[in-house]
Image (spheres, rainbow, N blue to C red):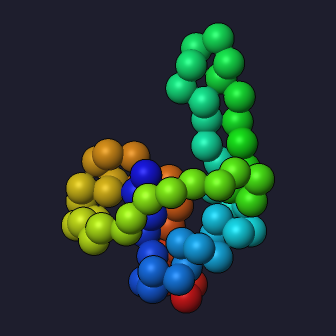
Amino acid sequence: MYFGVFQIAEIGAAKGAGAIEYRCMHPECNAVYRSDRLLTNGEVVEVSAQEAQSNGLVFDTQGSA
């Protein structure tokens, strides 16, 4: 997932607030889970804004930090 943020802590705040939704990739399920109800693991890697936008930016603070 790609997030447009100015501080890495904003990603955790967005997840904790349930602002991000995850969709199950199994066609027979297709359930949607809010980020405040789902435990996820992963690492944060910085990429260009262009890469994030072209690959599906799912959350952007748009400078509200």
- Residue 30 found in image quarter: top right
| Count of all numbered marks drawn on residues in the image | 0
- Residue 29 found in image quarter: top right
Name the residue: 24% across, 59% down: 50
Q: Give x and y (percent) for residue 52.
A: 32, 57
Q: Give x and y (percent) for residue 51.
A: 24, 56
Left or right placement of residue 9 versus residue 57 in this view = right
Q: Which residue appears farthest toward the top when viewing the image?
A: 28
In this picture, is 25 found above or below 16? above
Left or right placement of residue 31 versus residue 3 in this view = right
Left or right placement of residue 31 versus residue 56 in this view = right
In this rendered view, identify the residue nearer to me: 40 or 58. 40
In this rendered view, identify the residue nearer to me: 54 or 7. 7
Q: Give x and y (percent) for residue 19.
A: 69, 61
Q: Give x and y (percent) for residue 23.
A: 61, 35
In this picture, is 36 found above or below 4? above
In this picture, is 42 found above or below 4? above
In this rendered view, identify the residue nearer to me: 37 or 62. 37
Name the residue: 43% across, 52% down: 1
Which quadrant does the C terminus fall into? bottom right
Name the residue: 54% across, 72% down: 11
Name the residue: 77% across, 53% down: 37
